[in-house]
Image (spheres, rainbow, N blue to C red):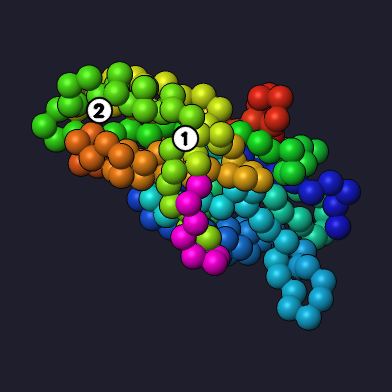
């Protein structure tokens, strides 16, 4: 076993956004195996490969800031070699960007930067950016959150750190937002759910959510 558990920064884009969290975990396990990198296993009755993703992602979201922790057996392999071997054995759309040691403790991960691209076939509705800016400036927006015990009403406003609108083109309005991502966490697609419920005339024909960057509680880049 190695002294420090390495960490990989990876992205999930293109058609890979439709890979579920469980399938993504299996994909990585297979990639390690095919690359000849032996993962250690957890102790106990049902041993599992020592690989975990920091913030499980909903299907359909793309990301350029995902973290994968893993633990390898045998002699130390350079981080550059791990990166090369894994990328040779992953599918299109899942790509390791860097591999490094001594990553920050996952419990210190606090904020997530996202971009929601709202696409309107007939063009962006009039005053949409101003209306949405005023809407998200409210003190309370209640949206149903899915929990293990069923739907639960939640005020999403305290979980939004910052938010701004940006017109991309005549048909695309982007919401740039920084949200809480742990204890408690806000799924950025809840912003889309709020628009659908409270401002149905601004409901987009298509929405794409991209996870862009992650930060600690001091809003310092998290790695």
Q: Relative to 102, is 188 on the left or the right?
A: left
The residue under the point 50% across, 34% down is: 157
x%, y% of residue 74?
82, 59
In the depicted structure, whether residue 96 falls above or below residue 53? above
Q: Residues within 10 Å of mark 2 (few under 14, many from 20)?
A: many
In the depicted structure, whether residue 219 falls above or below residue 157? above
> Which region of the structure is painted magenta?
148-154
Q: Residue furthest left?
A: 122
**Residue at mark 2:** 172
**Residue at mark 1:** 140
x%, y% of residue 7?
70, 44
Q: Relative to 32, is 143 on the left or the right?
A: left
**Closer to us: 38 or 27:** 27
Q: Earlier in the sequence, mark 1 or mark 2?
A: 1
x%, y% of residue 187?
49, 45
Q: Which image quadrant for residue 72?
A: bottom right
**Closer to us: 172 or 50:** 172
């Amino acid at each position: 076993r190695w002294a420090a558990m390495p960490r990989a920064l990876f992205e999930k884009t293109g058609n890979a956004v439709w890979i579920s969290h469980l399938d993504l975990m299996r994909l990585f396990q297979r990639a390690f195996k095919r690359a000849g990198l032996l993962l250690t296993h957890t102790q106990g009755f049902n041993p599992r490969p020592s690989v975990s993703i920091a913030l499980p992602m909903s299907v359909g979201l793309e990301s350029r800031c995902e973290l994968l922790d893993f633990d390898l057996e045998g002699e130390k392999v350079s981080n550059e070699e791990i990166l090369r071997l894994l990328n040779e054995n992953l599918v299109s759309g899942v790509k390791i960007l860097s591999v490094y040691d001594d990553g920050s403790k996952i419990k210190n991960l606090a904020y997530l930067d996202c971009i929601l691209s709202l696409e309107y076939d007939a063009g962006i509705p009039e005053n949409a950016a101003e209306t949405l800016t005023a809407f998200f400036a409210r003190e309370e927006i209640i949206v149903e959150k899915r929990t293990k015990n069923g739907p639960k009403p939640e005020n999403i406003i305290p979980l939004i750190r910052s938010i701004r609108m940006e017109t991309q083109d005549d048909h695309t309005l982007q919401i740039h937002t920084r949200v809480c991502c742990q204890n408690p966490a806000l799924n950025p697609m809840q912003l889309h759910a709020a628009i659908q419920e409270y401002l149905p005339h601004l409901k987009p024909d298509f929405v794409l959510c991209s996870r862009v960057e992650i930060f600690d509680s001091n809003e310092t880049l998290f790695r």
